[in-house]
Image: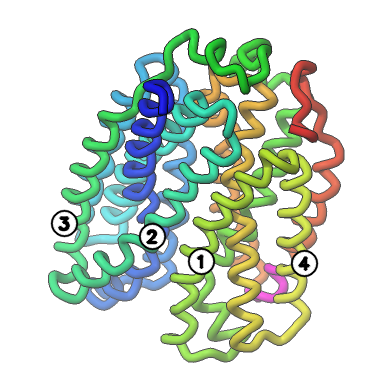
Amino acid sequence: MTLKNTSRWIVLFGAILIQICIGAVYSWSLFNEPLIMKHGWNKNDVVFTFSIVIFVFAFTTIFSGRLQDKIGPKRVSLIGGIIYGVGLMLTSTATSVFQLYIYYGVVAGIGIGFCYVCPLSTCIKWFPDKKGLITGITVGAFGFGSLIFKSVIQYLLDSKGVSETFLYLGIIYLLLIVIGSQFLKLPPKDYFSRDTKVNDNVEENNYTVSEMIKTKTFPILWIMYLLGTMSGLLVIGLAKDIGVQLAGLEPNVAANAVAIIALFNASGRLIWGALSDKLGRIRVILMLFVITSVSMFYMSFVTLNYISFFVTVASITFCFGGFLAVFPTITGDLYGMKNLGANYGIVYQAYGISALVGPIIASNTGSLIVTFLIAGILSVVGIFLTFTIKNPRKDLNIVNA
């Protein structure tokens, strides 16, 4: 193995370490009941914390993406790790819902946002010959975070209580992210020219943020991302309720969906990311929308049972992971690698908005079936939008590569 290959795999190790820590945010459902039991807070208020942290972390990527393009991923991820850890430590002192929103939703959310873009954009630049696969591995680590830390969190909750759990997790995440950030570095300026597997024009036509948002493709891409992630976020946030209300399962049985979600969310990122290198980004996105829409319509019109509940949850979260793996890559394909951190930070806002749109639809309809029907229709809209994507970069073919 060459020195070049050795160094880039070390970078990937650091990226995975960071992503696993911040990906533990998907374990939020484990905290709902303990917080309600200790403080007597309203369930909906506590659950809404998850929407806040997702929105804040996505919004923060606008700034962290630009910043890491200027001062480097190591410093930005280091700052993010410290903010994330401190946010969790502060959460351990929360005595009101408002403090919970500020400490966990805002402070920890900002920390996650600082960390998230750095491993992703850095690894894509190190692996221009395997962009889909490496993106899948990187964001897949984010998906696996909840699965890896689930047992740790549950042990701490049972032995230490909810407040001390936040304290210990803050310390653990801070230390691990600080270590992981030390491995993040950008490739040499002549790295692309030394990789014969990469298109010679890969660094040409690098769009700035202002140039990107003026292209006709950008709003279509942004809306597709929003529509694609909405169904997944709905199912992740309501999985237990779906099992109880629509499948008639006992609460403890329906809770097993948390592990299913973590497994298929993470594996979807890896598998779909790799497939996009073989089949093309647009073809994969089309497949993701088709599977998602069929699954959402199935939950809307068919009475669920034990098997169909877990199958539909698995298929939707499997595709959800795929959307999160393919869109960073297609952003680089369309708008270049040089400003990927800043550009994807803007595109990623669609994900943050979808975290709010889904719950708004659910609260206004008051029915899971109607909510899923609407989500299915919106996924069909996404199918049609895939046929309207045009590549502003004439030197690359995103459909076939």
* Labels 4 and 1 touching (C-beta < 8 A): no
Is 149 displayed left or right of 198 in the figure? left
Name the residue that disc number 3 marks. 168
What amino acid is labelled 2 in the image? Ser
* Labels 1 and 3 touching (C-beta < 8 A): no
Indicate the position of residue 356 as horizontal and vertical percent values. 55, 53
Helix, strand or loop at label 2? It is helix
372 inside magenta stretch: yes
* Labels 2 and 1 touching (C-beta < 8 A): yes
Name the disc covering residue 294, or none: 4
First of labels 3, 4 by sequence position: 3
Please identify the dominant SS of the magenta region: helix
Name the disc covering residue 144, or none: none
First of labels 2, 1 by sequence position: 2
Q: How far separated are the C-alphas under marks 2 and 1?
A: 9 Å
Is 97 displayed left or right of 255 in the figure? left
Helix, strand or loop at label 4? It is helix
Indicate the position of residue 326 as horizontal and vertical percent values. 63, 42
Name the residue that disc number 2 marks. 146
Residue 331's place in the image compared with 156, above or below, is above
Q: How far separated are the C-alphas under marks 3 and 4?
A: 42 Å
First of labels 4, 2 by sequence position: 2
Helix, strand or loop at label 1? It is helix
The part of the chain drawn in magenta is 366-373
* Labels 3 and 2 touching (C-beta < 8 A): no
Viewer-closest of 178 and 376: 178
First of labels 4, 1 by sequence position: 1
Name the residue that disc number 1 marks. 261
What amino acid is labelled 3 in the image? Tyr
Mark nearest the camera among 1 and 3 is: 1
Helix, strand or loop at label 3? It is helix
Viewer-closest of 28 and 24: 24
